[in-house]
């Protein structure tokens, strides 16, 4: 069997009649050999298609409850298509997605398969009668999952459960009432560590006790918690461990002066920080004028900057700042080319990632010498990439499969890549929507 058929099944341009043929083939193979990995892969690729007819969806769902569950999570199978008796996994999946029939819940809460009950326990919005059944389940793994996931008031009761594992799970659940959490925090039998790190409404004294844990990773878990106050933020800013200070930099209410202290001198590759994302225009202007390039770089990561700040950062003297702002939409081609002229290889990949980069600019970047491999990876996935730019990307091993999947790659190049010695490249070509229809036919058995 042609190993490229699975990739072909994912091709969005595959004609309907070929989808039908592949579905027939996959189901026949699965019936002949229920353990066939090829059949399983082909069925899943077909299940992911957005153009399946309803009868095809039902045919796939009837293959197995596991496939029906996959389709349910994929959004293509509806409650009207599911019988909870023969498709319990699919029924639970729909309840998990809030698209199921709530009347199923009580039946599934008494299902003989504990795995079904365990998964049901994690579903939101279950009727109270089903929740009560799960809270009394003989399998404590089911009860623990309910204590951890449910948004029902039953968490207050589960916080008193005799099994400490269930109580710990209830403590970790943000839906557990605050008074119950405080009682659990004082329970000498429980080792909570980072269990409460998702709670944002705890007393500051409790946060201070939890954040004083000897394990640095536990302290880091609380350092980024939006519930901790300014006094504790200042304490954690002086923590000797870098992972704690880096976590604190991600706190949404860290003071800007303190944030600057945390990032200056730290060579971490920061993503956009919550405090920067929430900064006002006046704060952004002040930060963009910082004497520290690390601070200006944080501002440059915003993708909604006012034009005057965007343009000012685009001509910054520091390459790291320019590299951060280069992918910002709205920059002119003249500005992007000027970045390359000033900073060369230090900004090439960031310029290539700009969504407004034109086809000619992308071609220019692939021809720049010295070159940067990351440029080819960006160009290979860019919607404006041209045929010549993509052909240049094929020369790079790590970019070759990305370029093979790009619809702007010339059809003759796509066809040639079907026989590439790298299977990933060949599969990318088989899934390319610009693959000629005649070639698609040739791949079929």
Image (cartoon, grey):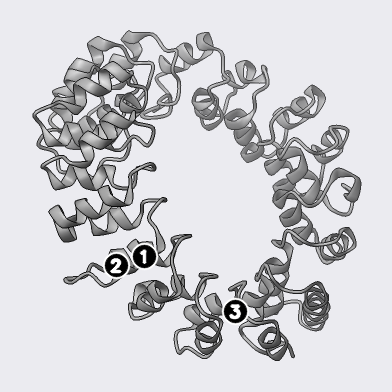
Q: CA distance from mark 1 to mark 2?
A: 6 Å
Q: Are marks 1 and 2 in contact (CB under 8 Å)?
A: yes
Q: Which of the labelled discs sits on residue 67, or is there none?
A: none
The residue that label 3 is drawn on is: 430
| Mark 3 residue crowding within 10 angstroms, few (<14) / some (14–19) / many (20+) | many
Question: Which SS class for mark 3?
Answer: helix
Q: Is residue 168 left or right of residue 445?
A: left
Q: Is residue 160 above or below residue 70?
A: above
Q: Give residue 237's position: percent from left, percent from top.
A: 18, 23
Question: Which SS class for mark 2?
Answer: helix
The residue that label 1 is drawn on is: 360
Q: CA distance from mark 2 to mark 3?
A: 28 Å
Image quarter for residue 170?
top right
| Mark 2 residue crowding within 10 angstroms, few (<14) / some (14–19) / many (20+) | some
Q: Residue at x 87, y 47 (%)?
A: 84
Q: Give residue 417's position: percent from left, percent from top.
A: 50, 86
Answer yes or no: is residue 289 visible.
yes
Answer yes or no: is residue 216 visible.
no
Q: Is residue 224 left or right of residue 25?
A: left
Report the quarter where the C terminus lies. Answer: bottom right
Q: Residue at x 39, y 19 (%)?
A: 188
Q: Is residue 217 left or right of residue 83?
A: left
The residue that label 2 is drawn on is: 364
């Amino acid at each position: 069997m042609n190993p490229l058929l699975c990739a072909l099944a994912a091709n969005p341009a595959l004609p309907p009649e070929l989808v039908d043929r592949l579905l027939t083939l996959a189901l026949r193979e699965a019936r002949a050999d229920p353990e066939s990995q090829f059949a399983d892969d082909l069925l899943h690729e077909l299940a992911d298609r957005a153009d399946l007819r309803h009868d095809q969806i039902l045919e796939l769902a009837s293959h197995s409850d596991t496939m029906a569950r996959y389709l349910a999570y994929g959004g293509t199978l509806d409650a009207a298509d599911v019988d909870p008796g023969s498709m319990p996994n699919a029924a639970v999946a729909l309840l998990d997605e809030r698209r199921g029939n709530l009347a199923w819940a009580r039946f599934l809460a008494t299902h003989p398969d504990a795995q079904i009950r365990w998964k049901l326990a994690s579903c939101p919005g279950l009727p109270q009668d089903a929740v009560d059944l799960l809270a009394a389940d003989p399998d404590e793994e089911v009860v623990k999952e309910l204590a951890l996931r449910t948004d029902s008031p039953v968490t207050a009761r589960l916080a008193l459960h005799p099994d400490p594992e269930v109580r710990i799970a209830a403590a970790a659940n943000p839906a557990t009432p605050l008074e119950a959490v405080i009682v659990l925090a004082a329970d000498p039998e429980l080792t909570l560590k980072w269990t409460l790190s998702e709670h944002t409404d705890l007393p500051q004294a409790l946060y201070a006790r939890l954040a004083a844990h000897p394990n640095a990773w536990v302290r880091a878990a609380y350092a980024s918690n939006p519930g901790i106050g300014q006094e504790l933020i200042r304490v954690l800013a002086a923590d000797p461990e870098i992972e704690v200070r880096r976590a604190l930099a991600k706190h949404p209410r860290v003071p800007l002066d303190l944030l600057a202290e945390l990032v200056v001198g730290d060579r971490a590759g920061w993503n956009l920080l919550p405090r920067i994302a929430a900064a006002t225009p006046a704060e952004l202007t002040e930060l963009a004028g910082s004497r520290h390039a690390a601070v200006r770089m944080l501002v440059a990561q915003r993708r909604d900057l006012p034009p005057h700040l965007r343009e000012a950062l685009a001509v910054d003297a520091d390459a790291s700042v320019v590299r951060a702002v280069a992918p910002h939409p709205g920059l002119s081609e003249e500005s992007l080319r000027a970045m390359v002229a000033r900073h060369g290889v230090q900004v090439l990949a960031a310029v290539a990632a700009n969504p407004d980069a034109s086809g000619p600019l992308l071609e220019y970047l692939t021809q720049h010498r010295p070159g940067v491999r990351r440029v080819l990876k960006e160009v290979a996935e860019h919607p404006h990439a041209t045929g010549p730019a993509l052909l240049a990307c094929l020369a790079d091993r790590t970019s070759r499969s990305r370029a093979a999947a790009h619809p702007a790659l010339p059809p003759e190049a796509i066809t040639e890549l079907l026989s590439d010695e790298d299977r990933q490249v060949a599969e990318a070509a088989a899934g390319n929507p610009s693959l000629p229809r005649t070639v698609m036919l040739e791949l079929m058995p």
